[in-house]
């Protein structure tokens, strides 16, 4: 069991690193394509990546556990479709909102606002009738203070980009809560594949509704970024999350995943040369501190 937890830890840590790099790829691809087009293409690539992983993992597990393993997967098909649609709906709106927002703000801001999902989870649970400690509520206030310093300048306005990223963080919080419910009941790679199918459906629907333009000339300069977002960040990163959450407590898992904000800010500085003012750095510190305190409390409680 300990070995399984170590592997799960490595999977989640690798996923956070991949997602940190993905902010760079998302920022670059947004220069050439609309948000719905980007998410549709990366969803298709995510489906392809998970289908390939499914093929090889199934062959390995059937050889190890026998044909009964494949029979059980077939019997669980309906529950996987239901779970994948629910989790995929939240993931779809999370990625769409984030992709829209990242075109109007910096990678560092987007990454730190996104990890507010860790603090938003207990807030949602409170609204659903589950009591939370005063320390968690303090963390919420701390994160809101950090958000103010990070996103508000002298004119005290909340930019369009930061608003959309925050809406994405809310969607991700619901995705994490739904994933915690369904990850134990379904096979991880299949659940991930259905999530991407759901996201592809929503993205294509919005592409048609908003008449988003797309051509090969627009896709070509963003191709390398799209391949990374679709195959690595989506196909592998989100599958790592599902497999990791099967073996590690949700509070510890979210703590590991929230490191994506650190990687995002670091890569934004190293690769895109995006700097932060002292005021914005203070906001980042407050937001990340609230995340760490909340997760340490939940870890100790569990």
Image: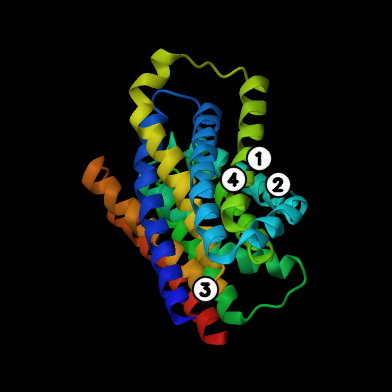
Q: Earlier in the sequence, mark 1 or mark 3?
A: 1
Q: Are marks 4 and 1 in contact (CB under 8 Å)?
A: no
Q: What is the spatial separation of the Cα atoms under label 2 and label 4, in whole angstroms? A: 10 Å
Check residue 85 in the rendering and tell me which mark sits there, or answer none.
2
Place residue 260 in its image quadrant: bottom left
Residue at disc 3, secondary structure: loop
Q: Are marks 1 and 2 in contact (CB under 8 Å)?
A: yes
Q: Are marks 2 and 4 in contact (CB under 8 Å)?
A: no
Q: What is the spatial separation of the Cα atoms under label 1 and label 3, in whole angstroms? A: 26 Å
Seen in the picture, residue 52 relative to 213 is either above or below; the reply is below
Place residue 126 in its image quadrant: bottom right
| Residue matched to label 4 | 193
Q: In the displayed structure, does residue 67 sit left or right of residue 299?
A: right
Q: Earlier in the sequence, mark 1 or mark 2?
A: 2
Q: Position of residue 197 (x, y in %)?
A: 63, 38
| Residue matched to label 1 | 198
Q: What is the spatial separation of the Cα atoms under label 1 and label 2, in whole angstroms? A: 6 Å
Screen quadrant of the C terminus: bottom right
- From the viewer's side, name the closer residue of 158 and 40: 40
Q: Earlier in the sequence, mark 2 or mark 4?
A: 2
Q: Earlier in the sequence, mark 3 or mark 4?
A: 4
Identify the residue at image location x=36%, y=34%: 225
**Residue 115 visible in the current orientation:** no
Check residue 142 in the rendering and tell me which mark sits there, or answer none.
none
């Amino acid at each position: 069991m300990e070995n399984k937890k170590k592997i799960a830890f490595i999977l989640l840590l690798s996923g956070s690193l991949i997602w940190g790099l993905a902010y760079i790829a998302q920022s670059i691809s947004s220069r050439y394509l609309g948000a719905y087009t980007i998410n549709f293409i990366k969803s298709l690539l995510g489906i392809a990546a998970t289908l390939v992983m499914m093929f090889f993992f199934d062959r390995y597990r059937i050889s190890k556990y026998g044909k009964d393993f494949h029979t059980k997967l077939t019997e669980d098909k309906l529950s996987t479709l239901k779970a994948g649609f629910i989790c995929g709906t939240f993931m779809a709106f999370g990625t769409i909102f984030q992709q829209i927002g990242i075109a109007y703000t910096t990678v560092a801001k987007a990454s730190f606002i996104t990890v507010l999902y860790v603090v938003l989870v207990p807030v949602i649970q409170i609204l659903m009738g589950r009591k939370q400690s005063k320390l968690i509520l303090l963390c919420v206030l701390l994160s809101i203070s950090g958000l103010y310093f990070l996103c508000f300048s002298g004119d005290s306005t909340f930019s369009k980009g930061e608003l959309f990223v925050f809406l994405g963080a809310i969607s991700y919080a619901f995705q994490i809560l739904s994933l915690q419910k369904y990850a134990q009941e379904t096979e991880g790679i299949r659940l991930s594949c259905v999530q991407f199918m759901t996201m592809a459906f929503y993205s294509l629907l919005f592409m048609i509704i908003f008449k988003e333009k797309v051509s090969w000339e627009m896709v070509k300069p963003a191709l390398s970024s799209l391949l990374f977002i679709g195959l690595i960040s989506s196909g592998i990163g989100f599958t790592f999350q599902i497999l990791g959450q099967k073996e590690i407590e949700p509070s510890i898992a979210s703590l590991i995943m929230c490191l994506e904000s650190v990687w995002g800010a670091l890569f934004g500085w190293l690769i895109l040369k995006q700097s932060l003012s002292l005021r914005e750095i203070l906001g980042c510190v407050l937001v990340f501190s609230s995340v760490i305190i909340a997760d340490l409390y939940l870890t100790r409680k569990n």
